[in-house]
């Protein structure tokens, strides 16, 4: 079975108010890319992935007349994808939903949130539901802060046709970039505040991870963390990246999540390391690669399912690089590249 995570930049812009694809030459949200070009590129990428389920980060919007599930199912129908059923979790206000597009002949999938419900008005200290409020003292002032998700993680209960039960947690955590800073001092303050919030969100996710591992669940945590080992200097200030917190680095082996790309980035202090995204830096007028997207699996599943990870990078993956059309589609479709995992389940 193949599972994937894929952040599709400005996916919502490709649909009208009736959830239909806008296949014309108007500009998409991507620089110098039309809607038709991005739509066709995405169709090529999804067909090449041939995944049994794809966690889509920045999925089409739900609100007013728009519905993410219908939009994704229309997209799947347009390209004849077997992943033709969509699942959405808690709706958010950002126009960037977290959704699962999957093959219903290979699995059953259900949005199955865990945690206290309804969440206490002032929040809870221990793993409340992801649409609730988490209390944690993030700025060390002896006063608990209220942490919320702008994009609550998607919790999926999945059962494959072979009878294997899985728990999936789809994640899109807040970027640590200091948007809105007017000075170096403000940039530093905002970076630290954003980092604290992101770490708190990942402590919240980690609490949920531990409850599943203690229960013996086959667990997969996947998505865009906007963070990773060695991504910026603020990691030294707090000791760990948010990815390492969710992975459980430093915990007993049975309580860790396996992610070889994160491990490679952590062990490689100099030189190249895995990357799942490519951004243009306007200051240096160059492209920057970053490892932001991950698929983490529980130790039990790692030992039993013999997982194989792949980052579909148009330049770093030889098979993608050798396929000129696919390489071009990957660059046109999004500023992130898919990550897949093949599991013997």
Image (cartoon, rainbow, N blue to C red):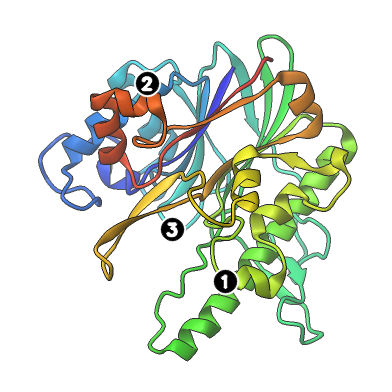
Q: Visible in this render: residue 4?
A: yes
Closer to the camera, 207 or 276?
276
Q: Which residue is mark 2?
A: 48
Q: Say which mark, if any, is on residue 233.
A: 1
320 left or right of 38 in image:
right
Distance CA(mark 2)–CA(mark 3): 29 Å
Looking at this view, name the residue that lies furthest to the front. 270
Picture coordinates of residue 308, whole percent (x, y): 61, 24
- State the residue at coordinates (28%, 67%): 284
Q: Is residue 119 above or below residue 309?
A: below
Q: Earlier in the sequence, mark 2 or mark 1?
A: 2
Quadrant into which the C terminus falls: top right
Residue 152 bears which disc, if any? none
Of residues 26 and 30, the one nearer the viewer is: 30
Report the side of 6 relative to 247 (left or right). Answer: left
Q: Which mark identifies residue 94?
A: 3
Quick one: SS at disc 2? helix
């Amino acid at each position: 079975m193949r599972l994937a995570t894929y952040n599709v930049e400005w996916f919502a812009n490709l649909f009208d108010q009736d959830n239909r694809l806008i296949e014309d030459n108007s500009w998409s949200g991507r620089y110098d890319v039309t809607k038709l070009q991005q739509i066709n590129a995405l169709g090529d990428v999804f067909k090449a992935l041939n995944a049994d389920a794809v966690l889509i980060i920045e999925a089409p919007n739900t609100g007013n007349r728009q519905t993410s599930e219908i939009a994704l199912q229309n997209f799947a129908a347009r390209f004849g994808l077997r992943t033709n059923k969509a699942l959405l979790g808690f709706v958010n206000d950002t126009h960037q939903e977290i959704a699962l597009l999957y093959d219903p002949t290979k699995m059953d999938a259900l949005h199955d949130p865990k945690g206290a419900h309804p969440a206490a008005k002032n929040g809870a200290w221990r793993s409340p539901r992801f649409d609730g409020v988490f209390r944690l003292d993030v700025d060390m002032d002896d006063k608990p802060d209220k942490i919320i998700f702008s994009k609550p993680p998607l919790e999926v209960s999945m059962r494959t046709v072979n009878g294997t039960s899985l728990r999936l947690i789809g994640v899109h955590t807040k970027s640590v970039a200091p948007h809105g800073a007017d000075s170096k001092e403000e940039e530093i303050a905002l970076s630290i505040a954003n980092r604290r919030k992101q770490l708190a969100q990942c402590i919240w996710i980690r609490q949920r991870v531990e409850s599943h591992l203690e229960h013996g669940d086959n667990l997969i945590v996947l998505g865009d963390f906007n963070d990773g080992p060695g991504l910026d200097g603020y990691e030294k200030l707090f000791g760990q990246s948010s990815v390492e917190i969710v992975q459980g680095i430093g915990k007993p082996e049975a309580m860790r999540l396996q992610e070889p790309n994160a491990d490679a980035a952590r062990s490689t202090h100099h030189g190249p390391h895995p990357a799942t995204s490519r951004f243009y830096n306007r200051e240096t007028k160059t492209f920057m690669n970053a490892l932001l997207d991950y698929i983490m699996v529980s130790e039990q599943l790692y030992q039993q399912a013999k997982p194989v990870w792949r980052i579909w990078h148009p330049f770093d993956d030889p098979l993608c690089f050798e396929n000129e059309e696919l390489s071009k589609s990957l660059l046109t479709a999004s500023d992130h590249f898919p990550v897949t995992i093949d599991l013997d389940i």
